[in-house]
Amino acid sequence: MTGLQSWREEKQSAWLYRSLADCEPDPRVAELFRALATAADRQAGTWAAGAAMAWRHYRYGKNYDALGALEIAGELAAADDDVGTKAATRMAGRLGWIWTLNRASTMRASATLAVESGEFFVGLAFEGTYGVLDVGFVGASTYRSLRSEPAAGAE
């Protein structure tokens, strides 16, 4: 569900609870429906927005095999939970290097600097992904021979 759909659902719930409160003859039950309407309105007041971007500059070896990439990324975000506190903000940047082990496996070392609602954070990360099913495991000569053969049915 998107944020807009969630907001609409909360507003619709608030309207429905108020309508039920207006029709309810028992004052205790009517008050319960009004409290539910107020809670739904509070939920509709909760919001968050953010944007992120990343730029990568790839480096290649002599056979045009990917060696790795320099990565620069940034993020801006803001959120409000509508409980009387001021909105939370986040501004972050990341600088890293991605080593390409094969076509499906990489390792990344990166540093992140962030400011979240006035608090400063520094982080270091080392990540790895390992791809099991990759043509690179077959071997370069086999891969070239597979590429040079015509496709089945093509003449």
Image (cartoon, helix red, strand yellow):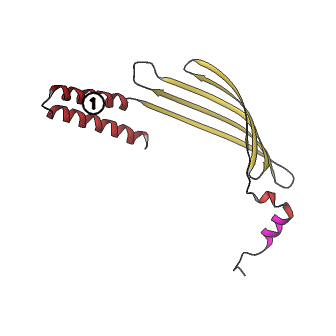
Q: Residue at x 50, y 28 (%)?
A: 78
Residue 153 magenta-highlighted: yes
Residue 109 rendering spot, x and y as whole percentages = 75, 35
Tell whether position 115 is magenta: no
Q: Quadrant of residue 8?
A: top left
Viewer-closest of 105 and 62: 105
Relative to 101, 87 lies left or right: left
Q: Is residue 86 above or below residue 30?
A: above
Name the residue rendered at 42%, 39% in the picture: 3
Taking depth in this image into account, of 139 and 95 the one nearest to the observer is 139
Residue beneath the point at 37% across and 37% down: 7
Please provide percent x and percent y for residue 17.
Answer: 24, 34
Image quadrant containing the N terminus:
top left
In the figure, is residue 115 to the left or right of 41? Answer: right
- Residue segment shown in magenta: 142-155
Left or right relative to 37: residue 82? right
Q: State the SS at label 1.
A: helix
Residue 15 in which image quadrant: top left
Percent x, y for residue 84?
A: 40, 18
Residue 76 to residue 1: above or below? above
Q: How many marks?
A: 1
Q: Is residue 134 above or below residue 71?
A: below
Image quarter in which the C terminus is found: bottom right
Q: How far across and down, in percent of the image, does residue 36 sit?
A: 28, 30
- Residue type indicated by callout 1: Ala
In depth, the one of 56 and 121 nearer the eye is 121
Q: Is residue 53 left or right of residue 83?
A: right
Q: What residue is drawn where x is 66% and y is 35%? A: 73
Within 10 angstroms of label 1, few (less than 14), some, or many (20 or more) residues?
Answer: many
On the image, numbered disc 1 is attached to which residue?
A: 37
> Outermost residue toward the left?
25
